[in-house]
Amino acid sequence: SKGYNINLGDNMAGCVVVDGTSAGTSPASVSNFVLNPQLATLSLNQSGNDVIVGSTAIYLDGTNGIDTNDGSSAANAVKTFARAKQRLIDTGGDVIIVIGAALINNTGELSNWDLSEKPNAVILRGLGYTGHLVHVPNGYSLTLSNITFDGNKENVALSTTNSIIYNNYGTLTINAGTTIRNNYYYGVYSYYGSMYMNGGTISNNNNYGVYCYSSTSRLDEFVMTGGTITENTSYGVYS
């Protein structure tokens, strides 16, 4: 179980905390509510004498999401990181929950992922989701800077769990401020891809931090000029 400290302004003294999504919904007052353990932050809004607890997470599904959605629930997931990032900024949230791999070749997707505007934000594996969080396909590239991925292995510890990043014949560049952590499988799986690590941290993943697969030896298979790969349960880098 988790403990939560909720600090409210004086104007909310004596109000009842109820489960809801936004102010103005007038839910029936109840004496308790359940916090989703995936979420690092909550929004609190006042509606009459009630304090409404609402999630500030944005849901991302690169397969079934739609970028005209607002990302407020799995059923209303957005399709691209570009849209999810904008929704985080709009809502003041700090969590993107991935329930379908973000595909770098999706229309409107970014090839440079940077969350420096949201330094406390995390991209988190959704409960029950075992696929890759990000897929870089053949002919595409992805550059990561100032961004954190969390595999949520405390809650998603299944043998079918895939890597956080899947670099499939693509090019992956990891720069300073990037964290890839806490996954039940590999942190990065680079399949016939090129990978350049200039900074950042890959840590606390089960099995390998980075697994590079190729039938032939190549100089660009994995090039590390900076950063740290540490505390993964097997090899830091396996090729």
Image: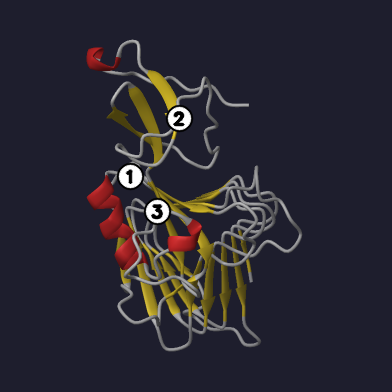
Above-or-below relation of 131 to 115: below
Above-or-below relation of 221 to 118: below
Can residue 103 be seen at all in this image of the molecule? yes
Residue 199 percent coordinates (x, y): 38, 56
- Residue 120, disc: none
Q: Alpha-carbon distance for marks 3 and 2?
A: 21 Å
Q: Quadrant of the C terminus?
A: bottom right
Of 65 and 38, the residue lying toward us: 65
Q: Nearer the viewer, mark 1 or mark 2?
A: 2
Q: Is residue 17 left or right of residue 93?
A: right
Can residue 116 be seen at all in this image of the molecule? no
Find disc 3 in the rendering and name its residue.
Answer: 72
Which numbered disc flags the more N-terminal residue, 1 or 2? 2
Question: Callout 3: helix, strand or loop?
Answer: loop
Question: Callout 1: helix, strand or loop?
Answer: loop
Residue type, mark 3 in image: Ser
Residue 208 percent coordinates (x, y): 65, 59
Q: Alpha-carbon distance for marks 1 and 3?
A: 11 Å
Find disc 2 in the rendering and name its residue.
Answer: 28
Which numbered disc flags the more N-terminal residue, 1 or 3? 3
Q: Alpha-carbon distance for marks 1 and 2?
A: 26 Å
Find disc 1 in the rendering and name its residue.
Answer: 93
Question: Callout 2: helix, strand or loop?
Answer: loop
Residue 183 percent coordinates (x, y): 61, 53
Could you tell me which residue is drawn at 55 percent across and 31 percent down?
34
Residue type, mark 1 in image: Gly
Could you tell me which residue is drawn at 58 percent across and 48 percent down?
152
Above-or-below relation of 210 to 156: below
